[in-house]
Amino acid sequence: MKYISTRGKSPELSFSEVVLEGLARDGGLYLPETLPDFSNRLGELSALRYQDLALEIFTPFMAPDFSVAEIAQLVERSYASFDHRSITPMKKVGEHWILELWHGPTFAFKDVALQFLGNLFEDLLKRSGNQLNIIGATSGDTGSAAIHGVKGKKGIKIFILHPKGKVSPVQEKQMTSVLDDNVVNIAIEGNFDDAQDTVKALFNDLEFKDQYQLGAVNSINWARVMAQIVYYFYGYFRWQEKTGEREVVFSVPTGNFGDIYAGYLAKQMGLPIKKLLLGTNENDILSRAFQSGDYSVSPVVPTISPSMDIQLASNFERYLFNLSGQNPEQVRQWMEEIKTKGAVQLSPELLSQANEEIQGFRVDAAQASDVMRRYHALGLELDPHTAVAVGAAEDSGLTDVICLSTAHPAKFEDTFKAATGDSPKIPQAIADLDGAETRHMESEASVEAIKALFIKLVSQA
Ligand SMILES: *Cc1c(COP(=O)(O)O)cnc(C)c1O
């Protein structure tokens, strides 16, 4: 498989190269040149356990750099850390289906991709003998999942920027209580978009990127999107066994557009997805884009679902590339408009084309809290992000929607209590964070400040 950049001015790369490159050198994001088609193999794939399904889906994307045996080994190692036999179990509660993606070590769906990416980095560095300095931005869950994916791994150092005071207490502790030498947490003044901008600027400084061998764990990294395709297939097969229906609808709580983009790709790869429902919180740039074509940036506001407190969604660029008919010139023009004017307006034709696949819904705090309260009464504890997916499914008027459940409610204990009047069940690993020793640094969000801090820490090591 060959990979190309959304902006058309970077060299074609192989899978291994793309994983290590992160952001393309022209500022774009890498995508596979073509997608494998699984539409004739659905029957055969439906019987596979999660790991074996992942192996089938990853193989065409990772060939020829990785053999089937190497991929199988990676997949087994990556999902051994999950606490459920099915990896991503599904249950029906009320009108809809809840696909639980948070059975990994940090209790959010980010583990599905980041456990795998951590092992993949380790294998690639073993092959090359190189070192990697990972720099990532987090709105809360990516940071802890990435840290747990690479802590203690040889040849890798990880620097995670989180917006100071804007992640939940559990999210913060999951990051700062990891005391391994190769882990650095930096609380920045500002919000997630500031952290993500800083990280992107460091990757765009090509001299710096090469000198320090920067690696990416944000969903600009293709491997993350790829790993997330699997649970759309897996969830679909479980749903089909129960309903006997053919065409499914997924509802996805969305921030950086990485999760839902994997669903879009699953559909292009032949999975019978009728529609993807995109749910946002009050940071509604994406739900607006899919309602009226208005993709215009507003200030980020803090909400009860902090992992989705994002305006500029990195992965939306990959979708724009598809929407433009794979036209890099058009993408470059749109990205320039976003940079200079903070907005792009999709034409009515493009909007209706986009709505064939994706519909946008805004689910505010009151509505999400109401969902949490009602599901609690039905006996299922939902976190505030999952509640956005359920709210979007309810607003669509459809039934039997698969709602992606992206985090364990214990990560957002205060919000859960406020919505339901009750405490969520607390897993032992989260209870153990109480009183744990923590360590972090602080910095302003400027590129210069982060660069200086980074250089100091790397040269100390
Ligand atoms: C990251 C995250 C999301 C949003 O996923 P994107 O891929 O950024 O759209 C939703 N819910 C939770 C709990 C998350 O951690």
Image (cartoon, rainbow, N blue to C red):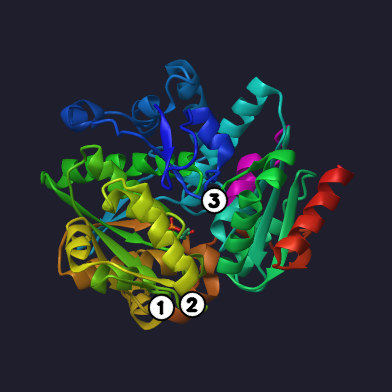
Q: Residue 285 in the image: state x and y as whole percent.
A: 38, 72
The answer to whether residue 386 is left or right of residue 393 is right
Q: Nearer the viewer, residue 110 or 79?
A: 110
Task: Kindly identify the residue that appears in the image at 56 percent across and 52 percent down.
Answer: 106
Could you say whether the residue bearing mark 3 is in a helix, strand or loop? loop
Q: CA distance from mark 3 to mark 2?
A: 21 Å
Give the residue at mark 3: 218
Q: Quadrant of ligand 1?
A: bottom left
Task: Kindly identify the residue that appears in the image at 81 percent across and 57 percent down.
Answer: 452
- Which of the two labelled residues, at mark 1 and mark 2, occupies the earlier sequence position? 1
Disc 3 residue crowd, few under 14, some 14–19, many 20+, Cα 10 Å: many
Q: Residue 366 in the image: state x and y as whole percent.
A: 37, 83
Disc 1 residue crowd, few under 14, some 14–19, many 20+, Cα 10 Å: some
Q: Is residue 156 above or below residue 196?
A: above
The answer to whether residue 148 is left or right of residue 85 is right
Give the magenta part as a residue range: 145-154
Q: CA distance from mark 1 to mark 2?
A: 7 Å
> Does the magenta stretch mainly form a helix, a strand or a loop?
helix
- Which of the two labelled residues, at mark 3 and mark 1, occupies the earlier sequence position? 3
**Given contact means CB atoms under 8 Å apart, are the residues at marks 1 and 2 in contact?**
yes
The amino acid marked with disc number 1 is Glu
Q: Which mark is residue 282?
A: 1
Q: Which mark is residue 303?
A: 2
Could you say whether the residue bearing mark 1 is in a helix, strand or loop? loop
Q: Is residue 410 above or below residue 149?
A: below
Query: Does the image show residue 82?
Result: yes
